[in-house]
Amino acid sequence: MPEPPAPPAPARAATGATIRLENLTKRYSGSAVPAVENVSMEIRAGEIVIFVGPSGCGKSTTLKMINRLIEPTSGRIRIDDEDVTGIDPVKLRRKVGYAIQSSGLFPHMTVAQNIALVPRMVGWPKSRIRNRVEEMLDLVGLDPGEFHHRYPRQLSGGQQQRVGVARALAADPPVLLMDEPFGAVDPITRDHLQDELIRLQHELHKTIVFVTHDFDEAIKLGDRIAVLRERSQIAQFDTPEAILTNPADDFVSGFVGAGAALKRLNLTRVRDVGVVDFPTACVDDPLQSIFDALRSGTANELLLLDRHHRPYKWLRRGDLMRAKGSLARAGTLVHDTVTRDATLRDALEAVLTDNAGRVAVTGRRGRYEGVVDMQTLMNSVHELLEADRLEAAEHQHTLEEQRAGRTRQEQEGGT
């Protein structure tokens, strides 16, 4: 029997939904105190909210109650005003994306089968599922032709996490829950996955609730951060800027840690500073044309791109003199790149790692987009530090005026 035609795609994808937690509590039998106690908060549609707090404070438990992987003891969870505490939890989980540490992919399924899992469960036609798998792979920066039939064991840790995010988004849920999804990968891969999530959010506008123990990650990713004490009690729920500049108490200050001004480098993106063009050539270009470009150019260096337009090697004039008709041994391999969604801190670390004082900027699938250099980054750092200095001086002036006002009141009251 022929398969029925796929329904027409919606005019636009599902965007985020408002989440309201109302007096949410979780008690485990045998425990003297609740794991989560009387938590209430509103998470606005389309924002990324980060839960951060010490180990064992209940942040993952709170997250898992949103899709009822853990059933709340009392309280309410509302998603776009629908009380989800009384509906079928299995149906709920098909409407809420969920990504965890180490991706959670099924090892016996291919990449395509993993991504197709929830769309297949909710009854999408095969043709629509097939198109969606390719769309999701492209969205997370993986070539569908290359990765469609691979198994998780054939992927790097970063690639597995990308597939895990693709699977979580495959059925187009308005809400995405992420429980320390990047905690098991190396720092460089983690930075790139964070950048990828920011890029995806610019396109998709989902409501994302993200658990981490890393405050720097929280600053980089969050529209707002909920700093949680034991039992998920909210110490402060505010923007990264507000928490960095005005922590609510000593507990929050402990999470901010030293160097709050420098942590603000995590709030500014590479896209907010100058990304400049740089001389480039392709590995397929004739060696003589590359030599001519270097010899005639004002710079003594160019960036060699591979066949997929990705940064490959930095080439200097002296390198070509030693090339002897081949680029195989010429130049220096590109080890670090950043995306436009990388923070200034990411870019500064990459530039400092490379003594030449610049780093290549890439877009989707690692394609070259430009270069950001040390001078640009240092100018931005100085601007941030100066802004902090002025803000601190203004704050001190306000405190002095308040103290003077109290002194006058006391003197007037004593006369």
Image (tube, grey):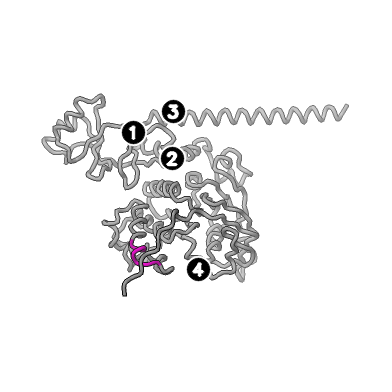
Q: Name the residue under label 4.
A: 91
Would residue 185 be visible to someone looking at this image? yes
**Chain-order first, disc 2 or disc 1:** 2
How far apart are the two marked residues, 3 and 1, measured between alpha carbons? Answer: 14 Å
Describe residue 113's horizontal placement relative to residue 414 as left or right: left
- Write the start and end of the magenta stretch as one range: 124-130
State the residue at coordinates (39%, 40%): 340
How far across and how far down the image is residue 312, in percent? 25, 41
Number of marks in picture: 4
Q: What element carries label 2?
A: loop
Front tag of 4 and 3:
4
| Identity of the residue furthest to the bottom in this view | 1
The reply to whether dot 4 and dot 2 touch (C-beta < 8 Å) is no
Q: Please name the residue shown 25% across and 34% down the image.
A: 280
The residue that mark 1 highlights is 358
Q: Position of residue 411 (x, y in %)?
A: 83, 27
Q: Name the residue under label 2.
A: 343
Q: Overall secondary structure of the magenta stretch?
A: helix
Residue hosting label 3? 379
Q: Give the Cα distance between marks 4 and 2.
A: 38 Å
Q: Name the kind of residue labelled 4 in the image.
A: Lys
The local crowd at label 4, few if under 14, some if 14 to 19, many if 20 or more residues have their Cα within 10 Å, is few
Q: Which of marks 4 and 3 is nearer the N terminus?
A: 4
Of residue 124 and residue 44, the one placed in the foreground of this image is 124
Q: Distance between the residues labelled 2 and 1?
A: 15 Å
Classify mark 1: residues with Cα within 10 Å, few (<14), some (14-19) or many (20+): many
- The location of residue 278, given as percent across then percent down, is 29, 32
- Which SS class for mark 4? helix
Q: Which of marks 4 and 1 is in front?
A: 4
